[in-house]
């Protein structure tokens, strides 16, 4: 028994030494200012905004697009995905308020066909409208209906894409942390995403890992066509990372944290965050019960074992557990600071990880009951089967 604990404590500390020093510097990411440069030619851009029942937030989201300080031509296509709350009317009102009705086209979404997720079907219809509304667009700006942008958001993305000859440039939006549940769980959501997809590896042309953040993605239109278009990822619930992988096969990609891109969608209650995780966690595991078991064991060793080891009677085992827990907390502090949260949340990461682990198990349960991928009243996993 004691020998097993010694081996376990060594393994747990080894995991955190690897994560802290060898895993793509994932925990050291911080928001970067938009690059400032003047281009000889500012390419045309078409923004596509899929929206389903987003009347509460679409006005501010579209307003932020219409206010962009972008020297080139920008056209905006909103795909109203069979909303029942007046999303399209609010969108038209936002365009009228900015005297920009000619820069916005609202497309009424068609019925969701089998094999498509709702969001990707909406984006596909936006791509079809683009061919007539903005045929000269070099870039397609995919941004969500709940995302608001600072005035220099598009300018910075285009400069980065043009200077790096990128197939895709993406920014991970700043999420809300207004309530206790959001302050406890949302920074960890960003931290875990960075752990799964180290930005340095995504941005390294020599590595195969691709990824993106779905709220804000600037995609080279030519590269997207070469990758098979939106149809190539029509059934992917985690569509942003799927698109990132497809685009990296066409050219370099870049992903960073944003200060000037923020989500208006809150997850104020604990159950809201739980459902956010449960919607797609089992999809991340390719709907494999074996991978779920590996995930449970891996998360238990990585996040739950360190505090448990610190209460063992053997001094050496306690020391290894404490060292692993300390490394865990230290790697979490930069994310907390990025979100303006106190560092005393850092030692509580094992409890937060337990919440995420339980929600992941629930994600598998929902899928097995035929309720996987539920979003905006749709059971998307059923549509894909």
Image (tube, grey):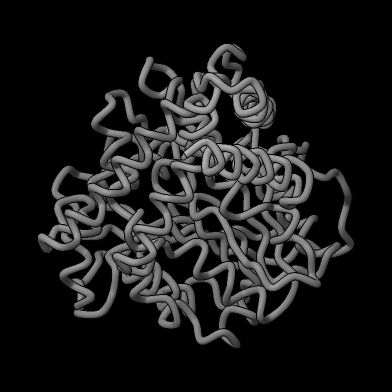
Residue found 35% across the figure and 54% down from its top: 281
Q: Please state the total of marks drawn on the protein image.
A: 0
Residue 299 shown left or right of residue 23 in the figure: left
Residue found 65% across the figure and 33% down from its top: 259
Question: In front: 15, or 90?
Answer: 15
Question: Quick check: can you spot residue 148?
Answer: no
Q: Position of residue 180 (x, y in %)?
A: 38, 15
Residue found 49% across the figure and 81% down from its top: 229
Residue 47 higher or lower than 327, as above or below: below
Residue lying furthest left: 369
Q: Position of residue 35 (x, y in %)?
A: 82, 45
Question: Quick check: can you spot residue 73?
Answer: yes
Residue 119, quarter of the rendered image: bottom left
Q: Position of residue 64 (x, y in %)?
A: 53, 39
Residue 360 shown left or right of residue 256 in the figure: left
Residue 271 shown left or right of residue 295 in the figure: left
Question: In front: 6, or 150?
Answer: 6
Residue 110, quarter of the rendered image: bottom left
Residue 40 shown left or right of residue 153 in the figure: right
Residue found 25% across the figure and 79% down from its top: 115
Residue 14 higher or lower than 188, as above or below: below
Question: In front: 244, or 319?
Answer: 319
Quadrant holding the C terminus: bottom left
Question: In front: 61, or 282?
Answer: 282
Residue 326, quarter of the rendered image: top right
Q: Position of residue 258 (x, y in %)?
A: 64, 39
């Amino acid at each position: 028994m004691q020998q097993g604990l010694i081996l376990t404590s060594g393994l747990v500390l080894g995991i955190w030494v690897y994560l802290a020093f060898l895993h793509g510097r994932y925990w050291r990411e911080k928001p970067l200012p938009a690059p400032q440069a003047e281009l000889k030619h500012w390419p045309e851009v078409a923004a596509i905004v899929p929206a389903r029942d987003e009347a509460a937030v679409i006005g501010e989201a579209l307003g932020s697009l219409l206010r962009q300080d972008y020297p080139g031509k920008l056209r905006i296509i909103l795909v109203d995905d069979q909303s029942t709350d007046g999303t399209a009317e609010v969108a038209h009102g936002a365009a009228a308020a900015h005297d920009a009705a000619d820069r916005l086209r609202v497309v009424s979404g068609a019925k969701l066909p089998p094999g498509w997720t709702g969001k990707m079907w909406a984006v596909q219809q936006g791509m079809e409208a683009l061919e007539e509304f903005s045929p000269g667009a070099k870039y397609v700006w995919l941004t969500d209906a709940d995302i608001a942008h600072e005035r220099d958001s598009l300018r910075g993305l285009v400069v980065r894409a043009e200077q790096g000859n990128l197939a895709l440039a993406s920014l991970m939006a700043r999420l809300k942390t207004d309530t206790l549940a959001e302050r406890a769980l949302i920074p960890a959501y960003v931290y875990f995403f960075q752990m799964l997809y180290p930005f340095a590896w995504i941005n390294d042309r020599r590595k195969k890992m691709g990824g993106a953040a779905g709220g804000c993605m600037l995609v080279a239109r030519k590269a997207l066509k070469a990758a098979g278009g939106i149809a190539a990822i029509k059934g992917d619930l985690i569509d942003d990372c799927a698109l990132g992988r497809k685009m990296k096969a066409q050219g370099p990609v870049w992903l960073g944290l944003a200060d000037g891109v923020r989500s208006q969608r809150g997850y104020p209650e604990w159950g809201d965050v739980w459902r956010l995780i449960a919607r797609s966690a089992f999809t991340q595991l390719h709907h494999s019960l074996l991978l779920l078991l590996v995930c449970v064991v891996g998360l238990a060793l990585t996040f739950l074992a360190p505090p448990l080891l610190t209460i063992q009677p053997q001094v050496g085992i306690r020391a290894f557990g404490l060292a692993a827990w300390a490394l865990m907390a230290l790697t979490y502090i930069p994310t907390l600071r990025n979100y303006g949260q106190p560092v005393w949340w850092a030692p509580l990461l094992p409890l937060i990880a337990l919440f995420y682990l339980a929600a992941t198990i629930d994600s598998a349960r929902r899928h097995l009951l035929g309720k996987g991928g539920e979003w905006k009243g749709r059971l998307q996993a059923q549509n894909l089967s």
